[in-house]
Amino acid sequence: MKESTTINKASINIEKIRADFPILSRKVNGKPLIYFDNGATAQKPLSVIEAIDNYYKTQNANIHRGVHTLSQEITIEYEKARSTIQKHLNAKHAHEIIFTKGTTDSINLVASSFGKKYISKGDEIIISLMEHHSNILPWQILCEERGAILKVIPINDAGELLMNEFEKLLNAKIKIVALTHISNTLGTINPVKEIIEIAHSKNIPVLIDGAQAVPHSAIDVQDLDADFYAFSGHKLFGPTGVGVLYGKEKWLNKMPPYQVGGGTIKTVTFDKTEYADLPLKFEAGTPHIEGGIGLATAIDYINEIGLDTIAKYEHELLVYATEAIQKIEGVKIIGTAKNKASVISFIVDGLHPFDIGTILDQLGIAVRTGHHCTQPLMQHFGIKGTIRASFAFYNTKQEIDEFIKGLERAIKMLK
Ligand SMILES: Cc1ncc(COP(=O)(O)O)c(C=O)c1O
């Protein structure tokens, strides 16, 4: 950890933190950047950028294969990164941490591999109405291939899961529940621990899509008792192209390899191949080595601040922004769950989200507009898209003030 990132654990030292993120000092369209698109991808602290830079300048070699010093050094470093992630998630074993390309890749891995082994004609899979397409399509394809059926947990007007409807869906045909921890569109924090407990009481395993949860809260996979937990490095202040699948050893050992090739084997003959033990069985080809190292560096960085401190500060930002947005005439927030992460989706009467996003961009303010890869959720609310502001711990109330002013200005210009 670099000295420049030493932070008071009890509260956010915002100046110090912002200085750690070089991109936050740039201008966009002549205005200081206000980055409120953290749900799409988060910015990177200097320590992560330097870890990647250092990898290419001093450490570059392939892992797990060489007898030479560079290869051995980087293999140790890469496996150290795996251990950092294991500790961060409180996984029981380092080999339960599978490096993937990201959340999408992790979910595809489970749908494909678990699906091959456990899903047959007439089986059922439960997801929810608020899933990102990445936690719909792998299961939809699996159902089409296997003749299985996709069941969907409905939600209420606030964007909360209807738990009694979930319980009604449970029956002996259900083979897996796949659910988002936090909705990227609504910000709803789902009661995943309770859901896992209910599913386990019927011997049904649960996959949690943690893409939006990992950046905002401490995750303990053993406490949750999750069977699978997926997330992406780039939303956790780490590099793009790398992510994680946590899987319980008992499932991963039984599941067949997903993609195969170099790195996944013990022995190969033209007649038969014996596959490697965990985690290598699921890590085909040369991995994103600097990605894994960068991700572990990002985890070190956020742990230095403390996830409880982060969650508390982001909640303050959420409350502050929600109160301000609600005062603007014609604005409707989509997603008003009691338990919410720092994500605000909204629509403005008679105006297209794209037009508002474009004007905000002229003011240096980056928000996301559109369906946020949750089209079934948009269909449920009868809308085409929303404007989404999603905050991280480097955002400030002053930035929210600027955003509110910009939003009012955009509405005035477009009406
Ligand atoms: C809830 C959720 N799941 C899955 C994904 C997909 O993540 P990735 O594109 O990093 O694979 C996202 C990305 O926005 C997301 O928000």
Image: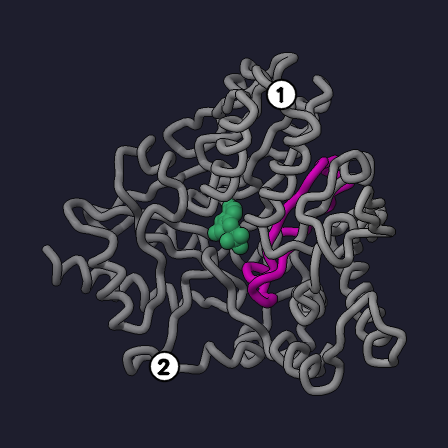
Q: Nearer the viewer, residue 118 or 231?
A: 118
Q: Amino acid at mark 1?
A: Ser
List x then y, in percent, for residue 383: 26, 38
Q: Residue at horizontal 40%, vertical 39%?
A: 336
Query: Which residue does the image show at 45% across and 67% down from the upper left?
Result: 396
Image check: 306 left or right of 403?
right
Q: Which of the two marks, 1 or 2, is nearer to us in this view?
A: 1
- Left or right position of 292 against 277: left
Q: In the current view of this chain or complex, which residue is farthest to the left?
A: 415
Crowding near the residue tagged with mark 1, few <14, some 14–19, many ≥20 C-alpha atoms within 10 Å: some
Q: Amino acid at mark 2?
A: Lys
Q: Does the residue tagged 2 have its C-beta within 8 Å of any atom of ligand 1?
A: no
Magenta stretch? 217-243
* Mark 1–mark 2 distance (CA, rounded to whole Å): 54 Å
Question: Residue, x 36% and y 51% (percent of image)?
Answer: 323
Q: Tell me which label, 1 or 2, sits earlier in the chain.
A: 2
Is any part of residue 341 visible from this angle?
no
Q: Secondary structure at mark 2?
A: strand
Tell me the SS state at disc 1. Answer: loop
In this rendered view, identify the residue nearer to me: 205 or 69. Answer: 69
Q: Indicate the position of residue 69 as horizontal and vertical percent values.
A: 87, 80
Let me know if residue 132 is in the magenta part. no
Name the quadrant containing residue 402.
bottom left
Residue 100 position (above or below residue 78): above
User: Is residue 88 shown above or below 166?
Assistant: below
Which numbered dot is residue 120?
A: 1
User: Which residue position is annotated with label 2?
Assistant: 27
227 in the magenta segment: yes
